Each structure stands twice: as C-alpha cells, then as structure tokens.
Image: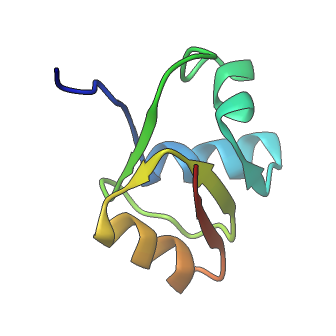
C-alpha cells in the first residue's frame, strides 16, 4: 500500500515564516495554521521560493527542497 503524503511547498513555508514570524516549522506548526492535519505525513517539495531561514521537521523532503532550506541557512530534520 502506498503511503500518502501531504505536500507542502517551499513557497508555503516562506509565507508562513514571514506572516507568522515562525522559524521552527513542524507538523504541529503546519496543523495549527490549518495547512495540514495533525496526523498527516508531510512531504516538503521545492515549489516556490524560500528566502526565510527556517528549521523544518517533516516526514520527507525532496532533495531540491532540502537543499533550498539549507541554502537559506535553515535545517532539515526527517521524522
């Protein structure tokens, strides 16, 4: 059975960081802002632009997304 991930794009993370002044983004952060369900498996994808320095904790990252997060000075933590 295929695991279904909820895709979250870098553009969404950037918007969240700038509008909500969040630098640590977790599944809880995403669910409290209505971007994902509490029990969703989150995959971060490289769509959009990330200028904010954010530390992201999620279940999966595309290679390009992880690279972009690190290039912006942030960290990537896989659950």
Residue lying farthest left?
1
Where does residue 52 sit, x and y in percent of width and height?
A: 65, 67
Q: Is residue 69 left or right of residue 19?
A: left
Which residue is pictured at 69% across the width and 42% down the height?
A: 26
Q: Position of residue 47 (x, y in %)?
A: 30, 53
Quadrant for the N terminus in the image:
top left
Residue 59 lies left or right of residue 61; in this view the side is right
Q: Closer to the camera, 10 or 78? A: 78
Classify residue 2 by image quadrant. top left
Q: What residue do we see at 73% from left, 29% from top?
A: 28
Foreground residue among 32 and 4: 4
- Residue 38 at what x, y percent from top left? 64, 16
The percent position of residue 30, horizontal first and vertical second, equals: 64, 30
Quadrant in the picture for residue 20: top right
Residue 67 occupies which quadrant of the picture?
bottom left
User: Which residue is most to the front?
Assistant: 1
Front position in the image: 77 or 67: 77
Q: Is residue 42 above or below residue 15?
A: above
Residue drawn at (66%, 21%), measured in percent from left and top?
31
Query: Please, which colouring scheme is shown?
Result: rainbow
The total number of labels drawn is 0
The image shows residue 5, relative to residue 11, as above or below, that is above
In the shown orientation, is residue 44 left or right of residue 58?
A: left
């Amino acid at each position: 059975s295929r695991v279904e991930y909820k895709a979250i794009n870098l553009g969404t993370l950037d918007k969240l960081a700038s509008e909500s002044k969040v630098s640590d983004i977790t599944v809880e952060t995403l669910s409290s802002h209505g971007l994902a369900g509490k029990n969703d498996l989150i995959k971060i994808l490289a769509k959009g632009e990330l200028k904010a320095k954010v530390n992201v904790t999620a279940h999966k990252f595309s290679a390009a997304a992880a690279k972009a997060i690190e290039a912006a000075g942030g960290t990537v933590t896989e659950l």
